[in-house]
């Protein structure tokens, strides 16, 4: 257990991040070790300020379509692991997936996230034509950006997905520590998974990596993961608290408190201020939205429409059939917090800048000037570290 850090120790680190300076691994670890709400408040305030500078008051919305819960893997943390007899299993047809996606688009989503386990239907014989066809159909029907989360697929499949209009590839490492990774993603090659993200970036796809919290990792391992994510060509970085799943080897773990996730979201914002950072509804449902946004997140993910038979990941049923994981409900919550749903044009502008940045990082093209969604850093008034609020 960590000792709550004094604000005087973390204030200079926060000030350096606000000034646009890169934090060291030790500084990242110091911030991630915060586990006292009063010490975390200035961190959240700084993260929210950096989000405002880069994105204004606009928040993006992602529709989530988990179209196949079948998987060939035995990840120890996942409800949908191959060996779990208690896992709900289904495969949605192309027509069903397109219909749900169109509904999400009409409700105001900026992007459709098409997710599946490493379904043996595709992976057993390496036949991914049906997946490419599905992405093409959803892209055509909705006109929205499409994120594909199919697990580790070959480079030629990634190229085919890009050819039919996929904009994003999501593939979570969960932790950038080989020993912890081996306990989580049993039988899966660490380097192959990392290479899949690199291949996707090489092909011009925007890429997301994610980290899982509360699975026995140390603060130093969390810090190493944040640092490793910062070095990748990523457009989106995610942190989510592990929710113990029935029928899995980690079902016995005591759920972690949420401050670790909120602090990590804020640290991701301080270290990667211009990236998309999700506030997922898949851990605490709609009740957890405001705290994650306040910690610096700027994307609401895992919008799942009711009455479609679709499941979530960490929480397979939470708030779905009640209609609480929908764009109208989220919009109302954001407006009450003084924020708004961003426009499609704002999302497109950010995506164009992100591709330029990723291409420049790969040495493919020179970086183009970046028009900011709000006041750019260069025009921001002199920064003052947010004052520590008085604990109530």
Image: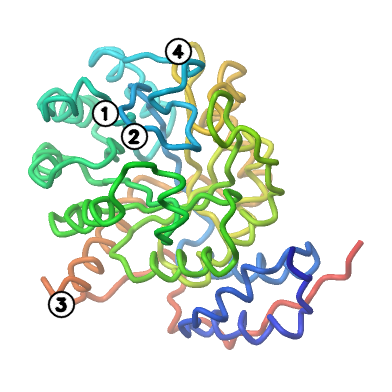
Query: Front-most of 1 and 301?
Result: 1
Question: Alpha carbon of mark 2 to alpha carbon of mark 1: how far?
Answer: 9 Å
Q: Is residue 100 above or below residue 254?
A: above
Q: Mark 4 or 3, which is nearer the eye?
A: 4
Instruction: Of the two numbered discs 4 and 3 on the same chain, state the one appearing first in sequence.
Output: 4
In 3D space, how far apart are the residues under numbered discs 2 and 4 (Cα atoms)?
17 Å
Residue visible at 56% across and 67% down in the picture: 267
* Separation (CA) of disc 4 from disc 3: 46 Å
Q: Nearer the viewer, mark 4 or mark 1?
A: 4
What residue is shown with label 4? 309
The residue under label 1 is: 142
Instruction: Pinpoint residue 338: horizontal percent, then vertical percent.
Output: 65, 51
Residue beneath label 3, please?
Answer: 366
Q: Is residue 47 left or right of residue 168?
A: right
**Residue under the point 46% across and 73% down:** 375
Per the image, label 2 sits on a secondary structure element best described as strand
Task: Kindly identify the residue that appears in the image at 11 percent across and 71 percent down.
Answer: 364
Residue denoted by label 2: 112
Quadrant of residue 177 within the rendered picture: bottom left
Judge the density around disc 4: few (<14), some (14-19), many (≥20) Cα neighbours within 10 Å: some
């Amino acid at each position: 257990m960590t000792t709550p850090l004094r604000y005087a120790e973390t204030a200079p680190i926060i000030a350096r991040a606000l000034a646009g300076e890169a934090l060291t691994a030790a500084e990242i670890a110091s911030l991630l070790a915060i586990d006292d709400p009063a010490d975390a408040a200035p961190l959240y305030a700084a993260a929210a300020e950096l989000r405002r500078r880069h994105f204004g008051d606009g928040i993006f919305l992602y529709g989530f379509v988990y179209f196949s819960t079948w998987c060939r893997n035995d990840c120890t943390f996942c409800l949908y692991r191959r060996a779990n007899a208690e896992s709900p299993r289904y495969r949605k047809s192309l027509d069903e997936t397109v219909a749900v996606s169109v509904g999400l688009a009409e409700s105001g989503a900026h992007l459709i996230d098409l997710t599946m386990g490493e379904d043996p239907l595709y992976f057993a014989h390496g036949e991914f034509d049906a997946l490419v066809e599905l992405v093409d159909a959803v892209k055509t029907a909705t006109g929205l950006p499409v994120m594909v989360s199919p697990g580790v697929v070959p480079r030629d499949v990634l190229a085919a997905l890009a050819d039919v209009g996929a904009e994003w590839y999501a593939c979570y490492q969960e932790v950038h520590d080989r020993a912890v990774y081996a306990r989580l993603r049993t039988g899966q090659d660490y380097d192959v998974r990392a290479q899949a993200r690199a291949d996707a970036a090489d092909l011009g796809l925007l890429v997301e990596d994610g980290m899982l919290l509360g699975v026995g990792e140390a603060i130093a391992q969390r810090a190493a993961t944040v640092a490793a994510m910062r070095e990748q060509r990523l457009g989106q970085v995610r942190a989510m608290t592990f929710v113990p799943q029935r029928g899995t080897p980690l079902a016995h773990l005591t759920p972690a408190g949420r401050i670790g996730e909120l602090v990590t979201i804020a640290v991701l914002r301080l270290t990667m201020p211009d990236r998309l950072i999700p506030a997922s509804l898949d851990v605490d449902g709609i009740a957890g939205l405001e705290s994650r946004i306040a910690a610096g997140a700027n994307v609401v993910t895992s919008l799942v429409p009711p009455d479609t038979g679709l499941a979530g990941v960490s929480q397979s049923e939470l708030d779905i059939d009640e209609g609480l994981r929908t764009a109208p409900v989220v919009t109302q919550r954001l407006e009450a917090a003084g924020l708004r749903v961003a426009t499609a044009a704002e999302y497109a502008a950010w995506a164009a800048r992100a591709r330029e940045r990723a291409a420049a990082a790969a040495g493919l093209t020179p970086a183009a000037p970046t028009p900011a969604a709000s006041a750019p850093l260069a025009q921001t008034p002199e920064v003052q570290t947010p004052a520590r609020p008085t604990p109530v």
